[in-house]
Image (tube, helix red, strand yellow):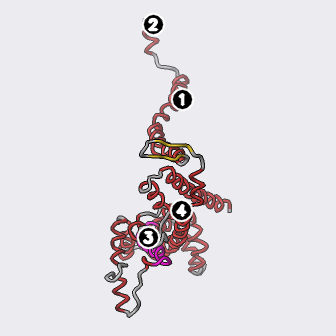
């Protein structure tokens, strides 16, 4: 009977807390385990396999591979088509990212007001962002079509020579940049709108009492308050525009004379048209490194601003 009572007696509080503390790490690990498994399977394993594949010469027909070290990377450095794709990609990023930041912020400042008109304009600018790349390029192909496109009709109506931006090396990539800006300008605009609405209105009221000009309010209150969002938009758009593919392939297919072939299209064509998977994987690792540099720049900018 005494032993039965001892089994039914509750544990002392100190011992119960110690047992609970011992169970806590294991229970937390079980909660995190599904995320860790998915992270390993969808990110770490593909990245590791991509690095290993970039060091191989793969023959899909024979089902064999040969380790060649850094030969693929050396060949990329000497490949004029790859260098052209890198140059086109950097040029495209320089054409689009500053405009995304400046124009997105300008639109957000103009549309950051209550009322139905502001809501309608925000929906109008953001509406194009939900369209697929196929629909966007189809619409702009009809605009810039030689002979019967909207741009050709306007040129004839104004008695001007027909302007064909996609047919000339100097204007083809800027034309794709215009299409991209029209397509996804709504995303940076909405990010800036969300940041502007987090600024306390008391700051603007105090500036109004001091008779501060609009430029002084913008440079001393608005811009410092949304600095993190500016850095975020710049880096996110840079990473996105480094991955240019659909617009260039559907509008020009890399032409004329490889003047619009971006890095992602080079990776796709090398891997799935020429079947050089090791060479394609090496180019993909270069692109991955560029995006890592972009993320590192964002972190550096944020730390520098916080220290200042």
Q: Is residue 130 visible?
A: no
Q: Residue at x 54, y 74 (%)?
A: 205
Q: Which residues are magenta?
A: 168-187
Q: CA distance from mark 4 to mark 1?
A: 57 Å
Q: Which comes before the other along the chain, label 2 or label 1?
A: 2
Residue 108 against residue 303 in the figure, above or below: below
- Inspect the magenta stretch and tell me whether residue 112 lies in it: no
Task: Give the labeled residue for mark 3.
Answer: 180
Lateral position of residue 306 relative to residue 47, left or right: right
- Tell which tag, 3 or 1, sits nearer the viewer: 3
Disc 4 crowd rating (10 Å Cα; few below 14, some 14-19, many 20+) is: some
Residue 21 - label: 1
Q: Is residue 278 visible?
A: yes
Q: Assign the N terminus to one quadrant of the image.
A: top left
Q: Which comes before the other along the chain, label 3 or label 1?
A: 1
Residue 2 - label: 2
Q: Position of residue 8 (x, y in %)?
A: 43, 15
Disc 1 crowd rating (10 Å Cα; few below 14, some 14-19, many 20+) is: few
Res 75 → quadrant = bottom right
**Labels 4 & 2 near each other (Cβ < 8 A):** no
Q: CA distance from mark 4 to mark 2?
A: 84 Å
Q: Which comes before the other along the chain, label 4 or label 1?
A: 1
Task: Give the labeled residue for mark 4.
Answer: 82
Q: Residue at x 47, y 70 (%)?
A: 260
Lateral position of residue 114 relative to residue 50, left or right: left
Q: CA distance from mark 3 to mark 4?
A: 23 Å
Q: CA distance from mark 3 to mark 2?
A: 81 Å
**Helix, strand or loop status at disc 1:** helix
- Tell which tag, 3 or 2, sits nearer the viewer: 3
Q: CA distance from mark 3 to mark 1?
A: 54 Å
């Amino acid at each position: 009977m005494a032993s039965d009572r001892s089994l039914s007696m509750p544990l002392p509080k100190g011992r119960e807390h110690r047992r609970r503390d011992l169970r806590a790490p294991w229970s937390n690990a079980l909660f995190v385990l599904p995320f860790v498994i998915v992270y390993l399977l969808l990110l770490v394993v593909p990245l590791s396999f991509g690095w290993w594949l970039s060091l191989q010469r793969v023959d899909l027909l024979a089902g064999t591979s040969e380790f060649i070290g850094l030969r693929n990377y050396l060949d990329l450095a000497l490949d004029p088509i790859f260098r052209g794709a890198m140059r086109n990609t950097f040029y495209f990023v320089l054409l689009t990212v500053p405009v995304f930041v400046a124009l997105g912020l300008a639109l957000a400042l103009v549309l950051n007001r209550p009322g139905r008109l502001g809501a309608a304009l925000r929906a109008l600018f953001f509406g194009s962002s939900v369209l697929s790349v196929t629909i966007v390029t189809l619409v702009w192909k009809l605009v810039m079509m030689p002979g019967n496109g909207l741009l050709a009709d306007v040129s004839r109506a104004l008695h001007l020579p027909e302007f064909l931006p996609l047919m000339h090396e100097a204007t083809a990539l800027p034309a794709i940049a215009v299409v991209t800006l029209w397509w996804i300008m709504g995303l940076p605009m909405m990010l800036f709108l969300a940041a502007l609405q987090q600024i306390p209105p008391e700051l603007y009221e105090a500036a109004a009492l001091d008779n501060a000009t609009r430029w002084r309010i913008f440079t001393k209150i608005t811009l410092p308050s949304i600095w993190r969002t500016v850095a975020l938009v710049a880096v996110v758009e840079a990473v996105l525009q480094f991955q240019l593919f659909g617009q260039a392939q559907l509008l020009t297919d890399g032409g004329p004379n490889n003047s619009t072939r971006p890095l992602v299209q080079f990776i796709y064509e090398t891997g799935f048209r020429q079947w050089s998977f090791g060479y394609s994987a090496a180019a993909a690792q270069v692109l991955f490194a560029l995006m890592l540099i972009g993320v590192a720049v964002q972190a550096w900018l944020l730390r520098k601003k916080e220290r200042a």
